[in-house]
Image: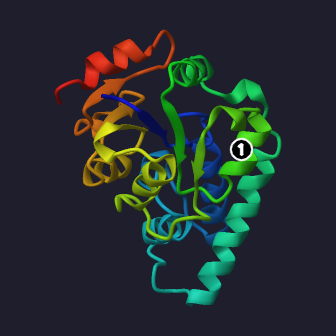
Amino acid sequence: MISCCIFDLDGVIVDTAKYHYQAWAEMARALGFEFTPEQGEATKGVSRMASLEIVLRAGGMENRFSAGQKERMAAEKNERYLSFVRQMTADEVLPGVRTFLEELRARGVKVVLGSASKNAGVILDRCGIRPLFDVVVDGTLVTKAKPDPEVFAKGAELAGERPADCVVFEDAAAGIEAATRAGMRSVGVGGSPTLSAATMQLRTFEGFTLEKLAAGVDGK
């Protein structure tokens, strides 16, 4: 049974991962080193401060700054990121996503956002899709980063659904692990080989339906 679908935001609903990467790369460049797209993959699905640690390690600078300095650096990165986000439009919702969300709601399946981003509300509003979600759980409601299952467990709780009846859509390995630890099935979105632990794989939402989802995760 599938009574609830929980979606990560970045790289699943919209491609804001590219804006996160650009903001981290600009910060790294200001510190005197390059942060590559390959290194940026490790920041997907994790909290802002955890991402900062990944960036600083890439430049060999993880022990060079105080906790207060790191807080300021993370805040400055977020301002860079928000400058991109504030220019987003409904056209940035990934292909097929809106249609699939609308089908889920029409079929009585709860739709939940489960994201580490503290800017999720801004993005949903800019893209005009907040009304498609029954519950929004973001970085303002949880304290533990994926792969901790907190964000998905909270989403199921607020939706009033059992974890076993929830399916998580994720584009990051940390998110797939979090879903598994929460007792939920998962869909790895985007086709990355790092998502092999997901219950099923999905390259694009175009043409994807609830029936295809059920066929892909049933009995696994």
Q: Is residue 210 above or below residue 219?
A: above
Q: Nearer the viewer, residue 154 or 57?
A: 154
**In front: 164, or 55?**
164
Instruction: Find residue 164 and report its horizontal and vertical position in percent.
Output: 28, 42
Q: Quadrant of the N terminus?
A: top left
Is 204 above or below relative to 135? above
Compare residues 90 and 16 and report the one nearer the observer: 90
Classify residue 212 as left or right of residue 46. Answer: left
* Residue 203 percent location from the top left of the image: 41, 21
Q: Is residue 111 left or right of residue 187?
A: right
Q: Residue furthest left?
A: 219
In this view, the residue farthest toward the top is: 207
Res 34 visible: yes
Where's residue 160, x and y in %? 46, 47
Q: How is the image coloured?
A: rainbow
> What SS does tag 1 mark?
helix
Task: Left or right? Give the position of 209 relative to 119.
Answer: left
Quarter where residue 27 is shown: bottom right
Front in this rendered view, residue 164 or 95: 164
For the residue marked with disc 1, what is the amino acid? Ile
Q: Residue at x 25, y 32 (%)?
A: 199
Counting every numbered tag in the picture gives 1
Quarter assignment of residue 168: top left
| Residue occupying image coordinates x 50% and y 43% | 8
Q: Position of residue 184 (x, y in %)?
A: 30, 43
- Residue indicated by mark 1: 123
Residue at 37% over, 13% down: 211
Is the residue marked by circle 1 packed among few (<14), some (14-19), or many (20+) residues within 10 Å?
many
In the displayed structure image, the side of residue 124 where residue 197 appears, left or right: left
Q: Is residue 44 visible?
A: no
- What residue sits 56% from the left and 88% below the top? 67
